[in-house]
Amino acid sequence: MAVSSGYRLRNTALPGEQFLLGVYHKSGAGAMPSAKALGAAICLPARPAKRRGATHFQSASHLRGGFTTARRGGVTPAPYRILPSRLPLCSSCLRGSAPNGPACISSGSRYNPADQEAPSDLDYRETIAYLHSLTDYEKTRIERYAPDTLDVTRVVRLLERLGNPHTRFRSLHIAGTKGKGSTAAMLESCLRAAGHVTGLYTSPHLHTFRERMMVAGKLISRDEVITLVTELQPLVETIPGLTTFEVTTAISFLYFARSGVEVAAIEVGLGGRLDATNVLAPEVSVITSLSLDHTYLLGTTLKEIAGEKAGIIKPGVPVITAPQRPEALEVLESACLEIGSPLTKVGVDWTYDAGPVDLDGQTFTATRVSGGPSDLDGEYRIPLLGRHQLENAVCAIAALDAATGPDLDVPPDAVSAGLRDVRWPGRMEVVSRQPLIVVDCAHNPYSAQQLRAGLEEWFPGRRWVLIFGASADKDVDGMLRALLPMSDYVIATRSEHPRATAPIEIADAVASAGGGAEVCVGMEQALRRGIEQMGPDHGLLVTGSIFLVAGAREELARQNGDSLPETDQETES
């Protein structure tokens, strides 16, 4: 079959499916694609699925990445409505000019959100929809990374009107390109094991918005989300330009303060300097591994990216950094020197020796080199796979060592227990052993390289069937260069996130790298085809974005009859 420049499509009926589009990679005229170079099979459902979470493809635009007409479960989600306000605010309140937060001049009383009653007709779905009706840079591209787009002063104003809840608990602030979520989870787990009332704020979430803010290891409840958003909505409307992330950050701080949190691990959302979380005065600042990501926003060099991450460094506050490349480390060292913040470098001031590994985790020994021995020197075990997690764990240990004092005691046994019990799904996670299925949220070339190194160490000699999808602003070519050498078969797909790259574009990238890819528009079919392609010595790897991993975990749970992770996708899509 001759294939000219461009694509040639053919329709072939398959049992249980409406049609199959065979897409062959670009070749010279008269060329016959080899089996290896065979491009893509695009599978569409035969009929609307009725189960929760099914996606219905209604037009060819879906093959190009457009999901504007798709509806999940065959139901058009109800549009959000503005949350009803029952607050008798005066003009001074609406302008935000009351000195200590909103107040009614006639009564002289300060606005207390806890006194307000949540509307009876407001439900969780509408609440999440309202949050996403604000400017949501997780779903739309940020065109300009500058104070007029990401304005921390907006968050300051909102928090002031709430009584500055972020000043009522201690915090540990974590920035970085990779590993900041894992490190935050480790810190929270250790602090909780030490008996402290803890908070954990991370983003984005895997399955539910509620994962973003946890107290004492438990997700915020739906009712609490409804109550807090309802209370903040009248204030949000008085501060133009507040984004979804900025409001969510304020909600988390208010929730932590009301819940009696003593200390919280707070993950930066994007960058550092302009991030909504950068209102904190933390006990310690942690900067995890830096690599090229969000380059169109943060800069195209490690030096520029390090400068943005260094924006969280505060005068006199201890800073812990993971091992960094020289150009990034130089920026961090200069920033710390300029404002008098002591810098601790993992790999120099704290070292570690890797120990045995298995499918349940790995052991290591951590030692403080600079300043003499530490009470936290010793052997530890973490249930997370990949040697890069050792760097994250030692960052957490060094941060706890720096933050420990009379009012924040974290003894060695608590650190050991916290690291042993930490849970952070979707990071080189073995979700099935028979067949072997691994999911990982790697979303840039460096993290893909770390993933490959981890898989080669934990599963030596094993080849992989790769299910791959990525967000539209990611370096797909760079990730594929890391992953294709260990992959015998590639399935290009996409998550249901609006910024997902079209599967055909993924297949094009695979072709440009000299391989071939089958395209499955939907995780159910991608997993089925992936498992069908596995030989006895294969593993199945799902990676490329956190949103893709979320879909895989949910679909596998459904297929296995397990309890599905709670998801908000029906309200977020």
Image: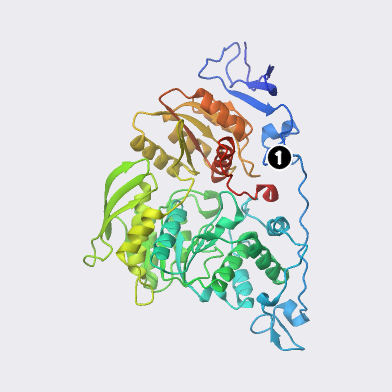
Image quarter for residue 190?
A: bottom left
Image quarter for residue 225?
A: bottom right
Visible in this render: residue 8?
Answer: yes
How many numbered circles does the render carry? 1
Across and down, in percent, residue 228 comes to 65, 67
Front residue of 46/327: it is: 46
Please rate how many residues cluster around mark 1, counting C-alpha atoms within 10 Å: few if below 14, some from 14 to 19, many from 20: many
Please name the colour scheme applied to the rendered image.
rainbow
In the figure, 404 relative to 63: above or below?
below
Judge left or right: residue 434 versus residue 410: right
Q: Quadrant of the N terminus?
A: top right
Q: Residue at x 68, y 69 (%)?
A: 232
Q: Is mark 1 on a helix, strand or loop?
A: loop
Front residue of 81/75: it is: 75
Front residue of 503/86: it is: 86
Across and down, in percent, residue 454 comes to 37, 40
In the figure, 546 relative to 408: above or below?
above
Across and down, in percent, residue 391 comes to 35, 52
In the figure, 60 relative to 200: above or below?
above
Image quarter for residue 361?
A: top left
Across and down, in percent, residue 355 comes to 27, 46
Judge left or right: residue 513 versus residue 412: right
Q: Which amino acid does label 1 sit on?
A: Phe
Judge left or right: residue 380 versus residue 104: left
Q: Which residue is drawn at 55% across and 71% down?
A: 259
Q: Name the residue under label 1.
A: 67
